[in-house]
DNA sequence: CTGAAAGCGCTAACAT
DNA sequence: ATGTTAGCGCTTTCAG
């Protein structure tokens, strides 16, 4: 691999001149610049980013930390983040914590050793304390789509108004006449989604008994299992709000499997708007998270942090919106 | 950030001793080792991987290059690859080419500058020439789940026997009595899947007219669109083989949308076995790709390449297997 | 406009 | 068992 010194020697100048020529700064005569460029071509020279990183203390690498890349929603977010990162000439280190705090911490240590320029932490992939500790040390961090049960005070974050997401889901179902409501929620992480939903239900005079609020684990299987239980309840719920689309798909599977209809017998609302939701039958009504917006907002904040603008906590909250598809309908009269 | 020199000074020894103590090699007395370890704790010292990389010419970073992380199948593969990489203390750089050769090439240049230790290239995310050029330069590369239209002779790769995958799909449908077959395939990349399918059809005396073989683009929308066209054909196909599950989901949407039943009127077979396929209604019959196996095999080959074992082309081909679910059934008598 | 020299934080021979 | 000394390939003052 050719080094800057190699081409300096070949051209008959010093490293400094080559560096200046390539960086486009300093004063280099057009003549020598051309000779240098030509030589760079011929020797196939590529600057060594590692050396550059060491010299500059900057790696142009960002870490994308998320709970589980195989869970839909995250790959869609990852694509959006990667896209904007690329536009800013940053590379992304993929850190999949598998919902394991210990693994997440291990990743974090490595990332620090690697001198990544910043962290994008999604979901609940890392304990807040560990993150705060890194911020303390001066590492730029932005939380993206953060879990709702811990308040990231003082930590820059971009997120969705999850409480409002729950509100939208509830308003929609109640407007359709549903009063036997059920919820599947991955608590405590997604508590706000549930709170928003519950608040509107209460306003409408609807009680959500504990049995009708099931614990989910953000997997499709957990949505399925929770729903199987919900279906044994009497009176049977006429509508189910699952706090992620992925769980909602499991819920739908469970309902259809026992021979009930969606939305004929049971309406289902999800949250996220993952790609597949629009293409299943019946297509899933859901509260959409604007993923591109989240990603670009997160990147902007992170980059300004890196640039040294210490907007202590320049956070952004993006409103979600309801997308009505075929999985919800007015409550049936016979229901 | 504390350096190795800082703790050397603090403890009252030299860098070498500290390095030896931390690396566990060389001879360091237990006493000083303890003092060093203590000091490391206190100062919160973390070795600088960048400096280490520069000194060793090794970055412990691998690049995962894929066409589109948001397309299901890739995140599932990515998780498997990331998992095995982590086990071997490698970090993964996520490179999403968006099916854009120019972008892919740009990524490649950066990766070279970054001195990544190796490349895992999935799907058809990079021109074979560019890859070959890097191998020429000595960069370890392994193709994983490579496209089928170009033969990666001499390049290490792990893949699935895609021809056999097509065979399994055809055999299954034909055994169910289907003779009006249709295919949706992302050619030329996935040509083998189609060839395997076509060969079995031909053996059974079934002709696949050009109209019944539609071009897909690995998106759910393209599966949908292609199917809409297929449904206008006369005679109408009684079975559709989509060469990826993702396209199969689009096909299913199209069939159900016009009021036909799956599998009552039309059977559908996919390929990949992405997670969601087992949970939709009807659950998708598909030819499964063993993703964990692919990932671990790819990593093994890559690591042995990195270790210098130049098994010119130690490639692996893994057999796929059929998973019969609810989207296929015997051809209806009235059909 | 170009050159010399120091330094980023670590590894790795080679000495002592 | 510990110290000395060169690099790795680049950036970055400071001189000429």
Image: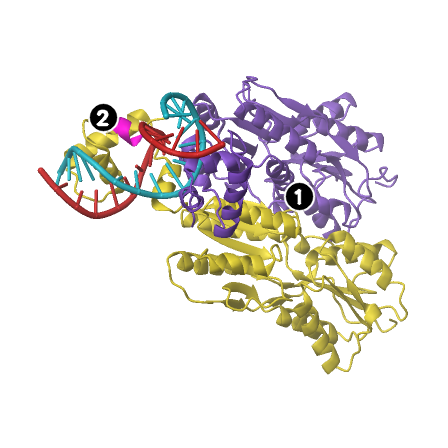
Chain colours: A yellow, B purple, C cyan, D red
* Lateral position of residue B269 relative to residue B306, left or right: right
Residue at the spot of label 1: B246
- In the image, B302 versus B181, the foreground residue is B302
- In the image, B287 versus A48, the foreground residue is A48
The chain that hosts pointer 2 is: A
Mark 2 element type:
helix
Q: Which quadrant of the view contains residue A195? A: bottom right
Q: Where is residue A191 in the image (x, y as percent from the top left)?
A: 68, 68
Q: Position of residue B64 (x, y in %)?
A: 54, 37
The chain that hosts pointer 1 is: B
Q: Position of residue A45 (x, y in %)?
A: 33, 30
Please rate how many residues cluster around mark 2, counting C-alpha atoms within 10 Å: few if below 14, some from 14 to 19, many from 20.
few
Magenta region, main secondary structure: helix
Indicate yes or no whether the magenta region holds residue A71.
no
Q: In this view, does A25 lie above or below B295?
A: below
Image quarter where the C terminus of chain B lies is top right
Magenta stretch bounds:
A3-7
Q: Can residue A278 be seen in this view?
A: yes
Q: Is residue B60 visible?
A: no
Residue at the spot of label 2: A9
Q: Distance between the residues labelled 1 and 2?
A: 55 Å
């Amino acid at each position: 691999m050719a080094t800057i010194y190699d081409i300096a020697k070949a051209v008959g100048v010093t490293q400094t001149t080559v560096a200046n020529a390539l960086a486009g700064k300093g004063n280099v005569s057009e003549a020598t610049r051309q000779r240098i460029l030509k030589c760079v071509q011929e020797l196939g020279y590529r600057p060594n980013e590692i050396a550059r990183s060491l010299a500059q203390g900057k790696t142009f690498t960002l870490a994308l930390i998320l709970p589980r890349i195989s869970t839909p929603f995250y790959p869609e977010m990852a694509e959006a983040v990667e896209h904007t990162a690329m536009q800013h000439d940053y590379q992304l280190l993929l850190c999949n914590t598998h919902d394991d705090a210990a693994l997440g911490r291990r990743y974090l240590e490595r990332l620090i050793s690697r001198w990544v320029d910043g962290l994008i932490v999604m979901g609940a992939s890392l304990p807040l304390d560990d993150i705060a500790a890194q911020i303390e040390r001066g590492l730029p961090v932005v939380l993206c789509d953060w879990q709702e049960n811990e308040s990231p005070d003082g930590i820059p974050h971009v997120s969705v108004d999850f409480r409002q997401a729950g509100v939208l889901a509830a308003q929609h179902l109640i407007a359709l006449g549903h009063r036997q409501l059920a919820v599947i929620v991955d608590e405590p992480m997604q508590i706000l989604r549930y709170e928003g939903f519950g608040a509107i239900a209460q306003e409408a005079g609807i009680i959500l008994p504990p049995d009708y609020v099931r614990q989910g684990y953000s997997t499709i299987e957990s949505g399925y299992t929770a729903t199987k239980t919900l279906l044994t309840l009497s009176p049977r719920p006429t509508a189910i709000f699952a706090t992620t689309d992925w769980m909602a798909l499991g819920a739908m599977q469970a309902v259809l499997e026992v021979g009930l209809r969606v939305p004929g017998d049971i309406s289902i609302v999800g949250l996220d708007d993952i790609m597949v939701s629009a293409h299943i039958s019946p297509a899933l009504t859901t509260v959409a998270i604007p993923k591109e917006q989240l990603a670009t907002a997160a990147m902007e904040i992170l980059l300004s942090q890196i640039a040294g603008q210490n907007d202590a906590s320049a956070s952004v909250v993006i409103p979600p919106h309801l997308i009505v598809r075929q999985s919800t309908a007015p409550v049936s009269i016979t229901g």
